Image (cartoon, coloured by chain):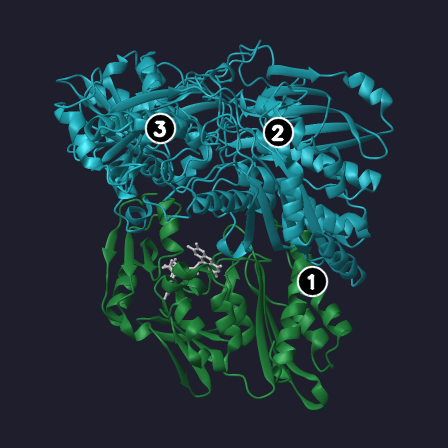
Chain colours: A green, B cyan
């Protein structure tokens, strides 16, 4: 468990960090919480020449509310998200997802930005960000761009981020009235990652019908995705056991499902359905003002 | 128990060893650093079976900081093979060389060692060792391995069947002829990784001046290690000093002698500098012994009323590629214990020990008994289901009665003493068994899958009489009361987490009427303590503790003689109490403990003929094993949609004889039961067809988490053993032995009304879900096809 030699930088502000990524680009790795990067380096599955530790950049820490959105700095830890009163009130789903990540030690070190940039196929945040229709902000010395979560995750461990960019913050729209969200996860028993993770967000409209719905799925495929056909099956309809069951049955439709010793593709599809239904039930109950 | 006072014995005292552990000021091997110390690494084979065409070490040798690179060729036989103490009649030889010689036979086998001046340079240099492999056919399935056409693990052997071991008691053929029903069950007890929190670690130092070789190792058997290292290196044993510092768990995995121990010693001697090796977790998975891995076909001959007439068990035991210290022996313990706690007069056991291209199996917590107990207890549930008899009732019916003890089994053991009914009734009462069955019936009506598991066990502890052990079954102690009145206990056993520094001190303090703080327990240092066998097989208190007890008796009597002389009182009328020696008939006649001790050393006024000093040594040879027992009850609920199992309740009623410290017993039981939860629901060392250990990281090898553990309720009956004077039996493995079948029985019971009769461990969610799908004709078939 000893990494290959590397050169270490600890920039104090974003500009300095951006200059370093610009200069070292492909040969560099940003270090945030280190809970994905360092294990890879210690196993020598990753051997960057330069490690740029962005942990000292104060500006990237913390959660605030701005123009009807939660703005979460890239270096905000899972624990900070999980325990933020602001997040719990405005976006319970996100706090729930954060609370499901790893263990206390992992949550105290791991960061939102690191998790999204790493894009592990079984990570929890990606599903949440998809369901919340969040924007992920990438900054380079040329400026910033906001990438919709729906476009951010490209493939296994691959995102839209370029080597000269730093993920600086995530913007999450705050849901209005009659909205509810929930995150439900079946843990892979060894790693604690999601065998299946489902983030569901629902807004109820007139006549208790589902006005809008978003379902983010993780653990099931090479990258997190929106369960579009399931969403379509629900939109505009009045939720009931039968409808939810049917819609949940479609969350893996058209998806190339992962299978491994912890769960075959078939099993993952089956439990994805179960967990999607449970997440939807909770989200709908919350949208209707009930606790779930 | 004949202690002078009972100030400590029987009390739930906190462990003396804990303050240093929880403060992080204890020392494990890896915490030790010596001047000029070098670091050793083992280059391991990625192949499960391959011919080594050549090893190019030139680049590694010239890498910065590298002191040496060695292959088997460089060793040229300087180190003997890994020792195996087990001998089974007609067993084929499969010794393990310390470095692979010409051929590798499991993935993870060492092919070269590199020594460098830091862990960093070492790691870089190890990548430069270039090994040219020629892959050979691999065999991983023990049943396929014994077929004629199977690839051979050892080319020079005629086949992969290392041995066949058979045992028959009674008349099995007749029993099956008389049977009204025959019940069959096939079960596997999967391969497990012992997973001590601290991996193995070794530090070797050689002093050229006085030719003294010191080996620090994370071991359960310091003396056996010393003897074996001396033999492997052909070095005089008087020059070898083994020191076992703090050990972060063993569970049997450190009851062994490993190549790294000999290699580090050899290199320290050769290079003239201390050499350290610290195992990584991945290495721990690949190259530290595994446990279990047995397949059993069991067949019962029964009467319709549930009376057991006979049983046949055919077992395939996967030994791995080579023998470690006890590899071939462990399955035979399964054979000996196969009758469990039942009257089974006619039994036949056939065990085939099989060589495969995997890491060796060996003793892992319970070592053979968890397998036996699992098989018989799953078997009993199968019989109960077949005959539609309540599983508790079936067991009760076939228990020998308390007055039947000592009880001879068909496998040739003599169970010392027991009251199986007593422990069972206690467990059932505490679990509210009858009420549970009613709740289960109600839950089933609502479609809930509630299961109740019951299992009874008997195990074999206090290993053991030397006649039945491969390398001695006695244990030793020296007790020395020092001139200041402090007591030094030197034990030949080697506790490593069990808490004997506390329980031994409780006994010593009570026997001598001093405080626990007056007593220190020293273990693990072969230059300090008398030769011992080690800590395993739930033997330390029952065998090692008894050796100490005998020494304490001896010193107590000597002190009383001295005091009697000084006080002019009959020693038989004196007692040791609160650091005084007091006359029972005249309390005014008393003497401080310290004065009697001082008198032994100043030796000016000793009774005639009494030697000065206060030291006693004892080598205790037990006359038999001990056989603790108990009944466990578990309640589970299965999520029919996901196969997830929730453990709702766990009740254990165990009998380990007299209890010196209930808190330690509780800790052992809880830990053991949790280890069973691991085996039942999570753990499995999975080798693929190519012999790659695919669950070889903690991200894939699941262990139970604290959150998976319900409140475990433990209760006790006390049936002291007549085998040793303290009446103690051993409890280190009981939890693991009792809990595994209990939990599986519970899960199978939850699905019994769906027609499910058995599921093999680990009961991972998918397996349970799949079973439910198949039993209910659900959608699982579809899902499987679509994969
Ligand atoms: C034992 C364990 C259990 C875990 N369990 C879970 C779990 O259940 N669910 C889950 O979702 N995750 C889990 N994780 C992963 C954990 O959440 C990681 O912390 C997270 O994936 C990465 O965040 P980090 O801050 O540690 O990133 P790092 O490890 O520092 O970096 C990860 C990658 O992202 C890049 N990166 C980091 N920050 C930025 C940035 N601001 N801009 C651009 N690139 C960046 C790095 O260069 C690197 O490639 C677990 C980890 C461990 C060790």
Q: Position of residue A54 (x, y in %)?
A: 29, 64
Closer to us: B23 or B209: B23
Q: CA distance from mark 2 to mark 1?
A: 41 Å
Rendered image quadrant of residue B382? top right
Can you say whether B346 is above or below B581 in the image?
A: above
**Figure label count:** 3
Q: Position of residue B747 (x, y in %)?
A: 69, 48
Disc 3 secondary structure class? helix
Residue carrying label 1: A253
Foreground: disc 2 or disc 1: 2
Same chain assignment for discs 1 and 3: no
Closer to us: B29 or B572: B572
Q: Earlier in the sequence, mark 2 or mark 3?
A: 2
Q: Are marks 2 and 1 in contact (CB under 8 Å)?
A: no
Classify mark 3 as within 8 Å of ligand 1 or not, answering yes or no.
no
- The quadrant where ligand 1 appears is bottom left
Characterize the local packing of mark 3: few (<14), some (14-19) or many (20 or more) Cα atoms within 10 angstroms: many
Q: What residue is at 54 percent from the left and 55 percent from the top?
A: B711
Q: Of the numbered discs in the image, which one, if any, rests on residue B294? A: 2
Q: Of the numbered discs in the image, which one, if any, rests on residue B548? A: 3
Q: CA distance from mark 1 to mark 3?
A: 69 Å
Q: Chain of mark 3?
A: B
In this picture, residue B171 sits left or right of residue B225: right
């Amino acid at each position: 468990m000893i990494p290959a030699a590397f050169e270490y930088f600890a920039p104090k502000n974003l500009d300095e960090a951006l200059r370093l990524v610009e200069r070292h680009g492909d040969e560099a790795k940003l270090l945030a919480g280190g809970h994905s990067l360092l294990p890879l380096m210690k196993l020598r599955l990753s051997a960057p020449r330069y490690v740029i530790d962005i942990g000292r950049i104060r500006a990237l820490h913390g959660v605030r509310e701005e123009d009807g959105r939660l703005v979460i700095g890239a270096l905000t830890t899972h624990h900070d998200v999980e325990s933020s009163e602001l997040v719990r009130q405005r976006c319970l789903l996100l706090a729930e997802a954060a609370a499901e990540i790893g263990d206390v030690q992992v949550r105290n070190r791991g960061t939102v930005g690191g998790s999204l940039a790493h894009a592990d196929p079984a990570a929890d945040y990606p599903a949440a960000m998809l369901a919340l229709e969040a924007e992920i902000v990438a900054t380079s010395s040329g400026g910033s761009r906001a990438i919709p979560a729906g476009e951010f995750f490209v493939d296994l461990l691959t995102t839209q981020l370029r080597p000269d960019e730093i993920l600086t913050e995530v913007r999450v729209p705050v849901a209005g009235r009659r909205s509810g969200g929930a995150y439900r996860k079946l843990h892979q028993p060894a790693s604690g990652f999601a065998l299946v993770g489902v983030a569901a967000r629902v807004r109820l409209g007139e006549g208790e019908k589902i006005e809008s719905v978003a379902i983010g799925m993780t653990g099931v495929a090479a990258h997190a995705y929106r369960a579009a056909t399931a969403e379509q099956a629900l939109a505009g309809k009045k939720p009931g056991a039968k409808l939810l069951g049917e819609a949940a049955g479609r969350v893996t439709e058209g998806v190339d499902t992962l299978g491994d010793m912890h769960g075959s593709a078939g099993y993952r599809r089956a439990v994805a359905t179960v967990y999607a239904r449970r997440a939807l039930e909770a989200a709908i109950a919350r949208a209707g003002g009930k606790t779930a | 128990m004949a202690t002078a006072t009972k100030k400590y014995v029987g009390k739930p005292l906190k462990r003396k060893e804990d303050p240093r552990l929880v403060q992080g000021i204890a020392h494990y091997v890896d915490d030790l650093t010596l001047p000029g110390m070098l670091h050793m690494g083992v280059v391991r084979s990625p192949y499960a079976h391959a011919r080594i065409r050549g090893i190019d070490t030139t680049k590694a040798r010239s890498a910065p900081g590298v002191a040496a690179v060695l292959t088997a060729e460089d060793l040229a036989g300087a180190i003997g093979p890994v020792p195996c103490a087990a001998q089974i009649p007609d067993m084929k030889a499969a010794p393990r060389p310390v470095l692979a010689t010409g051929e590798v036979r499991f993935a993870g086998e060492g092919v070269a060692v590199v020594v460098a001046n830091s862990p960093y340079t070492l790691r870089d240099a190890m990548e430069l060792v270039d090994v040219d492999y020629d892959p050979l056919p691999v065999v991983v399935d023990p049943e396929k391995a014994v077929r004629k056409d199977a690839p051979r693990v050892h080319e020079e052997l005629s086949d992969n069947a290392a041995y066949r071991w058979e045992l028959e008691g009674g008349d099995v053929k007749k029993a099956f002829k008389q049977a009204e029903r025959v019940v069959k069950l096939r079960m596997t007890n999967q391969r497990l990784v012992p997973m001590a929190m601290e991996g193995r670690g070794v530090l070797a130092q050689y002093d050229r001046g006085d030719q003294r070789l010191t080996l620090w190792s994370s071991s359960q058997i310091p003396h056996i290690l010393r003897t074996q290292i001396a033999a492997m290196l052909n070095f005089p044993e008087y020059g070898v000093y083994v020191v076992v510092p703090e050990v972060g768990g063993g569970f049997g995995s450190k009851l062994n002698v490993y190549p790294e121990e000999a290699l580090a010693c050899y290199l320290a001697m050769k290079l003239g500098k201390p050499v350290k090796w610290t195992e990584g977790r991945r290495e721990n998975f690949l190259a530290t012994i595994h446990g279990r891995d047995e397949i059993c076909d069991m067949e019962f001959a029964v009467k319709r009323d549930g009376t057991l007439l006979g049983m046949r068990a055919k077992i395939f035991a996967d030994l791995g590629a080579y023998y470690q210290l006890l590899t071939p022996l462990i399955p035979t313990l399964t054979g000996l214990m196969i009758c469990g706690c039942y009257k089974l007069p006619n039994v036949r056991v056939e065990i085939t020990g099989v060589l495969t291209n995997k890491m060796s199996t060996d003793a892992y917590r319970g070592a053979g008994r968890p397998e036996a107990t699992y098989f018989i207890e799953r078997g009993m549930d199968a019989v109960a289901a077949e005959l539609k008899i309540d599983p508790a009732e079936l067991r009760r019916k076939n228990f020998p009665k308390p007055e039947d003890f000592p009880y001879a089994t068909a496998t040739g053991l003599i169970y010392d003493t027991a009251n199986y009914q007593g422990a069972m009734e206690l467990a059932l009462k505490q679990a509210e068994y009858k009420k549970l069955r009613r709740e289960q019936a109600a839950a089933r009506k609502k479609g809930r899958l509630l299961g109740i598991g019951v299992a009874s066990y008997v195990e074999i502890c206090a290993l053991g009489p030397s006649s039945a052990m491969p390398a001695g079954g006695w244990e030793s102690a020296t007790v020395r009361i020092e001139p200041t009145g402090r007591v030094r206990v030197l034990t030949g056993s080697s506790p490593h987490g069990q808490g004997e520094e506390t329980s031994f001190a409780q006994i010593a303090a009570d026997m001598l009427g001093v405080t626990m703080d007056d007593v220190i327990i020293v273990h693990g240092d072969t230059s300090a303590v008398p030769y011992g066998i080690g800590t395993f097989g739930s033997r330390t208190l029952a065998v090692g503790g008894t050796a100490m007890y005998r020494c304490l008796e001896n010193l107590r009597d000597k002190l009383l003689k001295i005091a009697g002389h000084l006080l002019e009182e009959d020693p038989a009328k004196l007692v040791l109490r609160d650091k005084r020696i007091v006359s029972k008939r005249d309390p005014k006649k008393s003497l401080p403990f310290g004065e009697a001790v001082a008198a032994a050393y100043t030796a000016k006024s000793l009774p005639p003929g009494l030697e000065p000093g206060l030291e006693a040594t004892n080598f205790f040879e037990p006359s038999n094993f001990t056989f603790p027992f108990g009944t466990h009850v578990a309640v589970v609920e299965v999520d029919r949609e996901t196969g997830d199992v929730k453990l709702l309740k766990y009740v254990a009623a165990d009998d380990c004889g007299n209890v010196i410290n209930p808190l330690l017993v509780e800790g052992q039981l809880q830990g053991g039961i949790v280890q069973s939860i691991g085996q039942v629901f999570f753990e499995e060392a999975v080798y693929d067809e190519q012999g790659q250990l695919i669950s070889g990281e903690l991200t894939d090898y699941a262990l139970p988490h604290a959150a998976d553990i319900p409140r475990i309720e433990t209760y006790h009956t006390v049936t002291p053993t007549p085998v040793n004077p303290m009446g103690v039996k051993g409890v280190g493995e009981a939890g693991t032995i009792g809990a595994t079948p209990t939990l599986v029985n519970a899960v199978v019971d939850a699905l019994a009304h769906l027609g499910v009769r058995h599921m093999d461990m680990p009961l991972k969610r998918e397996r349970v879900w799949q079973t439910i799908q198949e039993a209910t004709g659900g959608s699982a078939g579809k899902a499987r096809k679509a994969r």
